[in-house]
Every structure is written in structure tokens, then in C-alpha cells.
Amino acid sequence: MAKFVVEPGADIDGFTLGECVHRGGMATLWSVSRDDIAVPLLMKIPRVSEGEDPAAIVSFEMEQMILPKLKGSHVPHCYAAGDFARQAYVVIERVPGETLYRRLGDLPLPYEEARVIALKIADALSDLHRHNVIHHDIKPSSIMFRPSGEAVLIDFGLSHHNQLPDLLQEEFRVPYGTAPYMAPERLLGVRDDPRSDLFSLGVLLYFFTTGVRPFGESETMAGMRRRLWRDPYPPCQLESDYPPWLQEIVLRCLEIDPVWRYPTASQLAFELSHPDQIKLTARSERLKRDPLSTVWRRRFNGNPIQERGKSAVAAQLAASPIVAVAIDVAEGSNELNDALRVTAERLLKTSPSARLACLNVLKLARVAIDRTLDEEGNNKHVGRLVTLKHWAAPLKLDESRLTTHVLESVDPAGAILAFAEANHVDHIVIGARQSSLVRTLLGSTSAKVATEAPCTVTVVRPPRQATEASKGEEPPDDRSLPAI
Amino acid sequence: MRLAFFADIHANRQAFTACLDAARARGAERFIFLGDYVGYGADPEWTVETVMGLVEQGALAVRGNHDNAIGSSAESMNAEAQAAIEWTRGRLSAPERKFLSELPLTREEDDRLYVHSEASQAAKWRYVRSAADAGRSLIATEAHVTFCGHIHRPALYSMSATGKMTSFVPISGVGVQLLSGRRWLAVLGSVGQPRDGDPAAAFAMFDTVSREITLCRVPYDVDTAAQRIRDNGLPPMLADRLFVGR
């Protein structure tokens, strides 16, 4: 079968080639168009001629396999893939704008700007990991942003799809990737841990906030291996005003053993969304690197990374859910709140890496400008937070796994749904409203949440006896109607 | 065209029926049988007749070692397998025995090779247990994709243009595109006697246009299949293992 001529104006399977927009070491990128596709397109063509690096072919094969399986706004949409039998290519949506690489001249960035960038990348990684894909090459030049602000991850040539053959696994003895960003476990041949991407994001965040790469730029194996035992300088040693919460996040991402990093990208995104609620540990106060005795112990006392069996990415994510409990603080909701706590406790027991977000909605009046102070002059918001913490206290959760949030909204269900969407909540636990009168007038919050939530919802009712006792003068037929 | 592949049915009528139904529901346009229709299970007549009927309608079939053992006492087998073969031999009619003995060891179609066991010496019934075994099989043939069975544990091997091997255990229901830049060996799980720890029956679909292979697992009526084995006086261990897929 004849090969195509690759030049401007050429027709490849119905795509008309425009200009060559990029010539990289592994592939060339062409702007292409096809009559029936309105969006701007890019065709990626691997360099496969004699003498080229065989890695270029294998990593292109990985993209051919993985790109068509991906969906969503955090990846470029894939329109077509051509095989090596004729002309290897993939056609993807051309995301407008530049990659984050363009910002390197502006480093270090203000902390808040860097936080928002890292949050967007963590959101994108959370979505990618849910598709069973680990990117393995997170760095400024693989990240773009849509006009709407969402991060788009590009370049999947080194990625691992947990449900597809990993063509790179056995191909090369040296780990392939971008040395400054590569997670330490990658140097030991581990390719199936999504937390490797969190390490790379930690490198990026460190670099973007200090202007310095935490592990330098060494590309030699010996230089890269140092990160298996040598921790980076704490950022506050480089920037005296470095916020402790940010150092906490960065150093947790850069933990040598993946077990000590955030369990999921969603949980990292959660922390980045709520910097005021981050539980500060010794990491946030660290002024110096680990003492040499610690470094030597890591270096000479065997593997600094705990061995673990092959794990499915999906199972790892499922073991670390974000659970949100919506708690009503109104009078008379004690039984319901106790029942909510029992349910939350069960969920947390089965997933030791789960984290719990306690929500309460401070309902605002639709028209009037609300006063956040009540008649006695107390701050309602603070009062609600205190109540939420009190509710959660019997769970005896480590502070790093617990956050409390008072959402202010005219629409409680809408506020809970928006929180769940923005924070990658995996499971909402909510009480069914008891009073049928209120429910009839206002509609049921739990019903709306259960119907529209992007995740699993558990609707909780108090135990039967408690309900009967507190029901008072409720019409007797009420219990036969489902509350949602 | 959508092809459905069945390996190691082993006279398990309940499992085979469930897989045929599932393959038809997935739009299978053609059936390919990779050998070992008999042995272990209690419904050899029905199984062989069904395969014969489908072959008459255009399905392709190759011979497995258990099928071979029906007409040849030279095949070496463990005691339970041997007992099942001797029992089966008495159940099959002359035309059924003739059908089995005349099946080819390999079939080729376009750039695909169908064979029961490792293909470098198909009559030796060697298992594909590792990437090295798969490599030996792929080097010995020209086919772009080889489909085999025999070991009752699914696996997917590939060989790159530079001769590097990869191995992978396919996930049920997740299609894998068999890229044309490398060569592939698909080892199917067993329809009638899975041994990868999952008791569900296994078959595979392959789309010749998208070049996507999908391993499918189907739950079936294990109780009846096992009861039939016991009722017919076959070694009880052959019934017990169906429940655990070992």
C-alpha cells in the first residue's frame, strides 16, 4: 500500500494538511482540516524513519491506543487515528493558546496564582485517573488551558492505561520521561501508581513558586536516583514568606514513598481548594532538609519505597473517596444527625484513606441583603462551623481527613450539588427532611440532591423508634411515602 | 466483520450456550472455534453436534489435544482427563469422531492464524505461558494476529518491530486495538473450564475493521454443568473446579 506524502496541501484519509506547527524529537504536528469537522485540528505524525529512536514509535503507539479512549474537557478530543500500515497519525482537537511552558520566564509566580494553576491541573489529573490513565509526563509543556479556564493535558506518549497493554513497560530498561519531574518510584520500574503524577505536579508547584527545580535538571540515572533518598530544600528556605499551607502541600506531593503523598488527585485538589483548612504537620514547619543520618538510612537500608503488589488504579481511587455529609443544624434534628454520623462512620471504616467534608447550608433570603450577624450579634457562619465540628468530634477523625464548610445560598440543594461537583465528591450522605409540611412547601433537598448528584447519594433517616417518638402530630400516612 | 472466538469448550453445554448467546447479542457475524470441544464436561454429543452445525454454516474450527485424544490413545493426560476422554469416546457417534479427527491443526484467514496451542509446532500441544513462549510462536508464523487457547487463562502478548515482547492480562469488556505496527498473540480463556480464578465462561470478540479485541466473561449455570458431570460418573473434581474457576 502506498504511503502518503506528508507536505502542506496533502490529503491523508480525508484530512487536508495545512502548515507544520511543530517539529519535535518524537513527532511533527500539522494543522489539518476536514469539511465535516468545524473545530481546528492537529495531526500528530511520528518520526519513524531509519535511525530514529524506537521509543518514538512505541510512545506513538501508546497515544494511538489511549487517546481514542479518553473523554472530557481535560484532554484533547481525538477525531481519528491512522495505522502504521499506511501512515501513522492521530488527529486531535487543536486547543488554542500556549502551554504552561511559556510561563517559565515569569517564575516565581505569586502563590495564589500558582495555587489556582495547580488546582486546575489536579482537577484534570483527577479526571484522567478516573479514566484509568496515569499521565507520567506532567510538566509545563504538557499542560494547556481552555478559554473557560480548565486545564487540558496533552502528550500521552509515556502514559499508562491500567486496562490496556503497557507497551512501554518492557520496552526500555531506562525509565522514559522528563527527568526533573519524574517520580522516584518510576526509577524502580513502577508504572501503575497514579500518585506518580502527584509527585510531578509537586515538582511543578515547587518550581513555579520558587523558580527553582527541587531535584535540579540532572538527566543522568545517578542524578535522578538521588531523589530516592535525598529530599529537596524546603521551599521556605528559598522564599522566606512561603506560606506554611503551601509548603505542606508541596512537600506532601514530593514524599519519596507514594504512600505518604495524597492518596488521590481529587484529595489534592480538595486541599488546594480549601487552603485555609489544611491540617499543617511538621512538613509545613520544616526549615532544613532531612539530616544526613536519615538520608543514609534511606540510601543504604534497602528500598525507601514500600513494595506493593500490582494494584488496579480504579481500586486505589475507590479506596480513597471524598465523602460529604450534609448536616442540618435546626432544632429537633438530633436523631437525624446521629443517624448521619452512624452512616458516615460506616463509610469511613471501610475506606481508611477516605476524607470527610461536613457541609451545612446557611440559607439566605432570596431578596433581602442578608446580615451575617444574628440578633445577638454573633456571627452565624462561625456558629455553624462550631456546630459542624461538634457533630464530627465523636468520629475521632484525624484533622487531615476532616473539613467543615458552611455554604451560603438561597438554594440548599443547589449549593450541595455545586460543592460536590467542584470538589470531586464521591459520595454524599444527606438526611431526609422529616416534616412533611416543610417538604411540601419547599420541596425536598435530599430528593433534588439524590436526583441530580454526579455521584452516589445515601439518604439517611433516623431509626424507626426515634422517628415515631419525634413525629408528634404528623399525619400517620406520611411514613408510607418515600421522602425522596 | 465481527468475529467471535471460542476456545476450550470442554463439553460444557451450559457455558457454551451462554457464550453463544452473548456473542450473538454482541453482533457476532462469524464463529471461530479454537479446539478442545470435548473432555471434562458431560455434554460432548451436544457440543460436537452444535459445532458441526455451525461449521456447516461457515464457522471455522481447529483441533485440540482432547479432540485428538478421542481418535488416538497416544495423547498423554492426567488421570481425570484420561477418564473423561474414555467416557467421551463411548458417547460420540462415528461421524462425530470423524469430524474431530479430521479437523485441521491450524487455519489461516487474511492476516490471522487460528490454532489450539503454541503455533511453532502445533501438534506438540505446547502451552503459551510466558512472553518467551509467545515470542517463539510469533516468530514461527507470518500472521499478524494469532489466536489460541489451551491454557485456559487469557493473555495478550505483542511483539514490536524490534522484537520486544509485552504481556498483558486483558480486562473483561475493555477493547484493545491490535495496532498494526506490531504482531499479536491472543490467548483465550476457556468457555467450559476457566482456570484463571474467575468461574465465568470466557470468549472473545474481534472486529476486523477497528482491529479491536474484547475479552468477554459470561456467568452461566455452573450448578447444572457440575451436576451433569457428577450424574454421569465423571471424576467429581472436574465438577468441583467449575465453581472456583481453578
Image: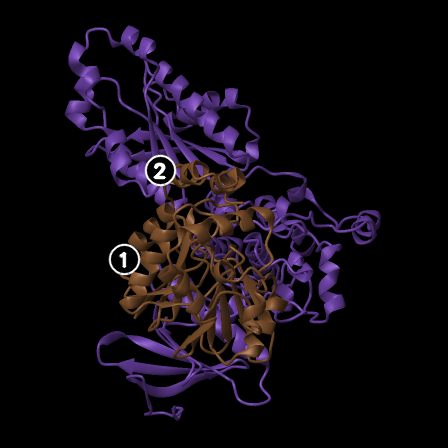
Chain colours: A purple, B brown
Q: For the residues tagged 2 and 1, is the chain the same?
A: no
Q: Nearer the viewer, mark 2 or mark 1?
A: 1
Q: Nearer the viewer, residue B191 or A412?
A: B191
Amino acid carrying label 1: it is Arg
Disc 2 packing (10 Å; few <14; some 14–19; many ≥20): some
Q: Nearer the viewer, residue B197 or A446?
A: B197
Q: Which SS class for mark 2?
A: strand
Q: Chain of mark 2?
A: A
Tell me, yes or no, if residue A387 can be seen here: no
Disc 1 packing (10 Å; few <14; some 14–19; many ≥20): few
Q: Locate residue A464 relative to residue A61 in the image: left or right.
A: left
**Which residue shows up at 55% across the image and 65% down it?**
A137
Q: Nearer the viewer, residue A425 or B120?
A: B120
Amino acid carrying label 2: it is Thr
Whole-percent x and y of residue A257?
67, 49
Q: In the rendered image, which residue does mark 1 sit on?
A: B24
All told, the count of numbered labels is 2
Whole-percent x and y of residue A169?
59, 65
Q: Quadrant of residue A338?
A: top left
Q: Locate residue A173 relative to residue A95 in the image: left or right.
A: right
Whole-percent x and y of residue B176?
43, 64
Whole-percent x and y of residue B105?
48, 71
- Residues under numbered marks 2 and 1 in contact, where contact means CB atoms less than 8 Å apart: no
Gap between marks 2 and 1 measured at Cα: 33 Å
Is A342 placed above or below B38 here? above
Q: In the rendered image, which residue does mark 2 sit on?
A: A456
Is A82 placed above or below A293 here? below
